[in-house]
Image (spheres, rainbow, N blue to C red):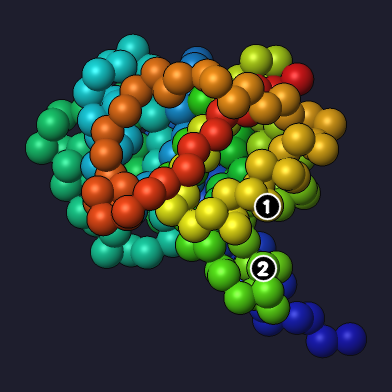
Amino acid sequence: MTANPHQAELAERRRALRAELQGRLPGETLPMVWEIGCGHGHFLAAYAAAHRGELCVGVDQELDRIRRAVRKQERARLTNLHFVRSEAGLFLEALPPGVVFKAVYVLFPDPWPKRRHHKHRLLQRGFMHAVADRAGEGTPFYFRTDHEPYFRDVETMLQQHPDWRLEPWTEWPFELATVFQVRAEKHYSLVAFRR
């Protein structure tokens, strides 16, 4: 039986990412603020500068975005901030044992608006189970998008999710208008908490 080259490549990426994260994350694991799809790092760099006692990690799949984000981190000398090139699911799998989330942010993810592409959307029931496995009771999940149908789908999914409780009137503890937010005519936000 021939080994699947895709599976072998994925296993190697997971191994390399595990090694990278073990080298970057402190031995005494702090609760982590995680931004998924951090782009050029504007939001998380500002958040980390305002919360220097918190460990902040941003992930994005695009190498150029990560390079720009790292430059922001280096210029600001933010030792509590790390940017990692990774898919969100793979990052979750590669996190060292014991790492838990203090908060999770997803700002303006790709909405994959066509029905046949919805399977590519990040925020789905299984992914939110995996996030919940790394979140303690009361951990907040912040989501913002300018695509109302995606927002409504995520809102419905979280209303029915056994691991999350929507709190529609909760204010965000930190605001910074992202590039997408500035460009958007309107945006939609929600906050959910780990049950």
Question: Tag 2: Cα neighbours inside 10 Å, few (<14), some, or many (≥20)?
Answer: some
Residue found 63% across the figure and 22% down from its top: 167
Q: Quadrant of residue 76?
A: top left
Q: Which mark is residue 68?
A: none
Task: Between label 2 and label 1, give the one nearer the viewer.
Answer: 1
Residue sitting nearer the eye, 94 or 76: 76
Q: Amino acid at mark 2?
A: His
* Residue at the spot 33% in from the left edge and 12% down from the top edge: 53
Residue placed at 17% from the left, 42% from the top? Answer: 72
Name the residue carrying label 1.
Answer: 153
Residue 71 visible here: yes
Q: Position of residue 98 (x, y in %)?
A: 64, 24
| Nearer to us in this view, 161 or 149 | 149
Residue 90 in view here: no
* Quarter of the view holding residue 171: top left
Q: Amino acid at mark 1?
A: Asp
29 displayed left or right of 167: left
In the rendered image, residue 25, in percent from the top left (x then y), is placed at 44, 30
Labelled pair 2, 1 in contact (Cβ < 8 Å): yes
Dot 1, crowdedness within 10 Å: few (<14), some or many (≥20)? Answer: few
The quarter of the rendered structure image containing the N terminus is: bottom right
Residue farthest to the left?
A: 75
Q: Residue furthest bottom?
A: 2
Closer to the camera in the image, 78 or 164: 164
In the rendered image, residue 107, in percent from the top left (x then y), is placed at: 43, 45
- Distance in Å between CA atoms under marks 2 and 1: 10 Å
Question: For numbered disc 1, what is the local secondary structure?
Answer: helix
Which label's residue is closer to the chain start, 2 or 1?
Answer: 2
Number of the label disc, if any, that sits on residue 118: 2
